[in-house]
Image (tube, rainbow, N blue to C red):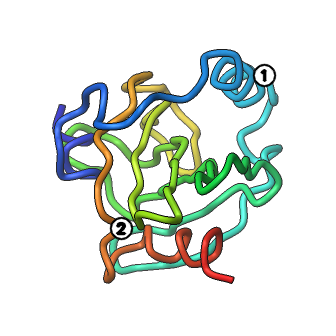
Amino acid sequence: MGSLADLTGTPWGTGLRAGLRRPLLAALVLAATTSGSAWAMGWTRLVETQTMTFYVNRNAIEKEGDIRRIWEMQDLKAADPEGVMSRRYLNEYDCKEKMHRIGQMTSFAGPKLTGKPLFEVAEWGYWRKVPPDGVFVVSYVMLCVK
């Protein structure tokens, strides 16, 4: 699916490392889907680029050893080729290895997680190095650099 590959640069799959425990994942998905409003999650704007605004939910950071999990949102300034204007996903960062992977993504036709949900991907993507010049480095620094 083009929008997922555009976001991650890699195909989606099971990844190279062990996955998130199912009970925690189920609780996070339930919390995200029953919040009533997407903005009830407490989004904080971190970065604005020419093509999008990048938000995180600082109220729901999970820590497990060197791993940090945070909900992130991309609010696009123009729809991508598949009609996506915004997307929400859980990003998992490995602070020790400087890597991240994305899962639990939902893409929407409207801005700020509004409009028709267009795509949902429950699987985790592959672990990838955090790009030094991308938006993910901002979350990595916030979560991992002391």
Disc 1 designates what residue? 34
Q: Residue at x 58, y 38 (%)?
A: 114
Q: Nearer the viewer, residue 3 or 9?
A: 9
Q: Is residue 22 above or below residue 138?
A: above
> Looking at the image, is mark 2 or mark 1 nearer the viewer?
2
The tag earlier along the polypeptide, 2 or 1, is 1
**How many angstroms separate mark 2 from mark 1 (CA)?**
30 Å
Look at the numbered disc 1 and give the secondary structure of its residue.
Answer: loop
> Is residue 90 rendered to the left or right of residue 125?
right
Residue type for callout 2:
Val
Quadrant including the N terminus: top left
Return the residue at label 2.
130
Mark 1 residue crowding within 10 angstroms, few (<14) / some (14–19) / many (20+):
few
Nearer to us in this view, 24 or 37: 24
Residue displayed at 71% across by 30% down: 32
x and y percent of residue 41 in the render? 78, 45
Q: Is residue 41 left or right of residue 56?
A: right
Identified by mark 1, the residue type is Thr
Q: Give neighbour class at mark 2: few <14, some 14-19, many 20+ (Cα, 10 Å).
A: many
Q: Quadrant of residue 15?
A: top left
User: Residue at horizontal 60%, vertical 23%?
Assistant: 21
Identify the image quadrant of residue 4: top left
Q: Is residue 81 left or right of residue 99?
A: left
The spot of residue 10 in percent (x, y) is 18, 45
Q: Which residue occupies the foreground of this view, 42 or 60?
A: 60
Looking at the image, is 88 positioned above or below residue 74? above
x and y percent of residue 95 in the render?
53, 64
**Circle 2 SS class:** loop
Q: Quadrant of the C terminus?
A: bottom right
